[in-house]
Amino acid sequence: MEVSNHARKRKAIDAGNNSPPSLPPAYRGSDGYDPNTVDFSLLEALEKSSHNPVEAVDLKTLKKLVLSFERRLRDNIAARLKYVENPEKFADSEVDLHDDLQKLKVLAGAPELYPELVASNTVPSIVNLLSHENADIANDVVQLLQDLTDEDALEDNDEPARVLVDALIENNVLELLVQNMNRLTEADPDEATAIYATLTVIENLVEVKPAVAEMVCERTKLLRWLLLKIKMRDFEGIKQYASEILAILLQNSTANQKRLGQMNGVDAVLEGVAMYKSKDPKTPDEEEMLENLFDCLCCLLMPLENKERFVNAEGVELMIIIMKQKKYAYGSAIRALDFAMTNYPPACERFMDVMGLKTAFAAFMGKIPLNKRIKRERYKEELEERVISLVASLFAGILRGSRRDRLLSKFVENEYEKIDRLMELYMRYSDRVRSEAERLDQIELDDLELDEDEKYNRKLESGLYSLQLIAVILGHIWCSEHSGMRARIELLLKQQKLSKNDVKEILQEYHDNIGDVEGAEEKERGQARIQLFISAM
């Protein structure tokens, strides 16, 4: 499954989030002194005048930090138990605990020590603070976990990272992170920062241990929380990040795709994209959010039951409306239709019934509106490949009756212009695949060995799959036994010094590898159909 390749790591939510988190208001002194108003010019001068080296993070430092943290934690627990009715009496112990949580962040600079941190049995103490009565302490822990699991911190430290992540999960970090997030509100700047940090921690955990994507959805109500955020009417940063996290959780998990479908997730995502059926996003961040939502939709459309939900929710109609409006989401709508109609005849039938052919074949003929704000390389080519796949799905899903006749008639009208276009695409993709095959042969002559699977995958990347689908469309047209279309195909092949045998060779290669492309469940039916084309031609 292919989704758009935008950045997965959010470097900054807003300008303020790059600075160290300020001390929560609860820690400010009763005399009105606010540590956040320190004159940083004095600190900079002091730093420049100091020649003391920064303390190295080694095992000795780790043990010292851990012992101090555990002592501060015990003191805070004792003070809270002793002065239950008098918060002022335990305020100092929470300031101390806050300070020690900040000090633990230095460990992010030595991820090789994470196994020692886990062995010290401090991880349970840290994780349990996510349920601390003082939300500021819990949010300190979130910020600490964000630092410890940061992509840059974990670079080239895969095994220590896995040790830490396993320990965090064993101590219910997923459940506690989401529970803590549910008591926060974006209206408060500090709490909003903690919400973003929580989502970042979950993203980081999935990066280290992909199975976390399903774990967090099984054990928590995160999916429900994310759905609420993407359904917000107005665009906000939290809506963008929620859409990104949702796409990550759905991308490689059939279980999550089905789970979200059962939660009316298809309707929710359609509601989100419908806001852009006749307008463009206003900013790059809003564009990214819209692409995230379409990534979510395409992931959701992989299980069969969600394709049915999509059709019932009039998703086909919405995508056609978006295409007709020719706004920013035009290409994404084609992609969603491609996913919906692949191996699902009811979606193909609905597409035909709501007059989608005219819109689809305009794109097929190369009349693709270019949005100046979409600067992706290969944008038009990607859409071309999607439309080829969409037309192939129509032929596979509409096998008989008046709908089939209407589909075939599109290739007759205007003096067979769509067959001309089909053969133009055939030649272009054929040339690209041939060039790649010659390049691979040269690599082997240079004593660089490639196995057959790798060679086949390289050819797929160069356009072989689209070429195979074009050959399949030609097979469907040939088997219609329409003499005019057959004659046109033969004429165009002859003009290129080719014959039906060249098309049959492509079909045969597709036949032999169809299970690798479409999935085992479609293999037998697809091979039978292609064998019919080969025999007929």
Image (cartoon, rainbow, N blue to C red):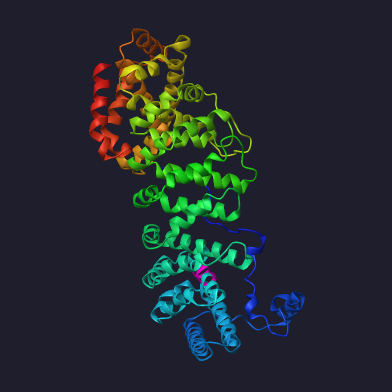
Q: Is residue 27 visible?
A: yes
Vertical arrangement, residue 125 with respect to residue 525, above or below: below
Vertical arrangement, residue 56 with respect to residue 451, above or below: below
> For the stretch drawn in magenta, what is the main secondary structure?
helix
Quarter of the image where one finds residue 477? top left
Residues 296 and 58: in front is: 296
- Residue 221: percent from the left, percent from the top? 42, 60
Residues 110 and 167: in front is: 167
The segment highlighted magenta reads 143-148
Residue at 46 percent of width and 46 percent of height = 296
Residues 361 and 135: in front is: 135
Q: Is residue 239 left or right of residue 412?
A: right
Q: Considering the image in quadrants, where does the N terminus appear?
A: top left
- Residue 396: percent from the left, percent from the top? 33, 27
- Residue 193: percent from the left, percent from the top? 59, 65
Count of numbered circles in the view: 0
Quarter of the image where one finds residue 134? bottom right
- Residue 537: percent from the left, percent from the top? 28, 16
Q: Is residue 475 left or right of residue 531?
A: right
Residues 142 and 223: in front is: 223
Q: Residue furthest front?
A: 85
Residue at 69 percent of width and 79 percent of height = 35
Q: Is residue 3 visible?
A: no
Q: Is residue 289 magenta-colored?
A: no
Vertical arrangement, residue 163 with respect to residue 91, above or below: above
